[in-house]
Image (cartoon, grey):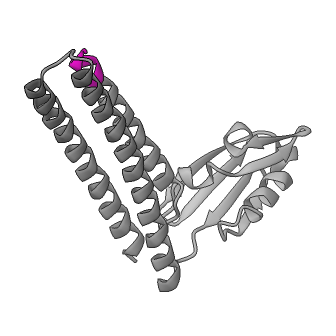
């Protein structure tokens, strides 16, 4: 059994889990404008369903405004409709090929709901890490059963792997706490 390759695999999988969490949080609306807010919006144009970022450029001129510059002016109506129908609660206002989106302030009730959603995302990340941990620890136990490593090595390897999981779990907690602060700040 090669502990270094197992450690690298665990590092990579847990890093991917954290990256997924960050991406989910990027699309979660706080009171501030974020270009990632519109990542999930799909526009019906050119006879197909396309992601918004393939027909327009999204920017944030200030904290409360998103600016969507549509590349083909013929698609402005379709982009407006897609944003309105996205369920994000945004009201697009167009001026030529530029669509402005003012971010309405979040109500206290909506902030609490978003905090619960953020907590759910963090819990899903932790569940994913527990599954990765269970798989890695199972490989170490099988190596002992197959007499590839000693029981002393098993304890050492399990301890080393647990340190990785503890660090990644603390990172998830930190990211989740920061997102909760972002959501609750007015």
Seen at 46% across and 71% down, the residue is 116
**Dominant SS in magenta:** helix
Instruction: State which quarter of the image contains the N terminus.
Output: top left
Q: Does 62 sit above or below residue 157? A: below
Q: Does 37 sit above or below residue 160? A: below
Q: Residue furthest right?
A: 47
Drawn side of residue 156 relative to residue 63, left or right: left
Q: Residue furthest bottom?
A: 108
Per the image, is 5 magenta?
yes
Q: Does 157 sit above or below residue 163? A: above
Seen at 67% across and 41% down, the residue is 53
Drawn side of residue 93 relative to residue 39, left or right: right
Q: Does 109 sit above or below residue 44? A: below
Residue 26: x percent and y percent?
48, 53
The range drawn in magenta is 1-6
Per the image, is 19 magenta?
no
**Residue 183 sits in quarter:** bottom left
Residue 87: x percent and y percent?
70, 66
Residue 144: x percent and y percent?
21, 24
Drawn side of residue 168 relative to residue 44, left or right: left
Seen at 49% across and 60% down, the residue is 62
| Numbered marks: total | 0
Q: Is 4 or 68 nearer to us in this picture?
A: 4
Q: Is 180 or 125 nearer to us in this picture?
A: 125
Residue 102: x percent and y percent?
61, 68
Seen at 35% across and 46% down, the residue is 130
Instruction: State which quarter of the image contains the C terminus.
Output: bottom left
């Amino acid at each position: 059994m090669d502990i270094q390759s197992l450690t690298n695999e665990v590092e990579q999988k847990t890093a991917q889990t954290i990256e997924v969490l960050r991406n989910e949080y990027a699309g979660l609306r706080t009171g501030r404008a974020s270009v990632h807010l519109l990542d999930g919006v799909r526009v019906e144009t050119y006879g197909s369903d396309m992601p918004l970022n393939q027909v327009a450029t999204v920017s944030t001129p200030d904290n409360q405004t998103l600016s969507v510059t549509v590349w083909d002016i013929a698609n402005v109506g379709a982009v407006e409709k897609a944003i309105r129908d996205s369920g994000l609660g945004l009201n697009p206002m167009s001026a030529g090929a530029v669509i402005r989106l003012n971010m309405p302030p979040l109500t206290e009730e909506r902030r609490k709901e978003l905090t619960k959603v953020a907590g759910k995302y963090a819990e899903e990340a932790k569940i994913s890490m527990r599954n990765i941990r269970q798989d890695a620890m199972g490989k170490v136990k099988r190596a002992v059963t197959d007499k590839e490593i000693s029981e002393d090595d098993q304890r050492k390897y399990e301890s080393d792997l647990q340190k990785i999981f503890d660090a990644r779990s603390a990172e998830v907690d930190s990211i989740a706490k920061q997102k909760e602060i972002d959501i609750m700040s007015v």
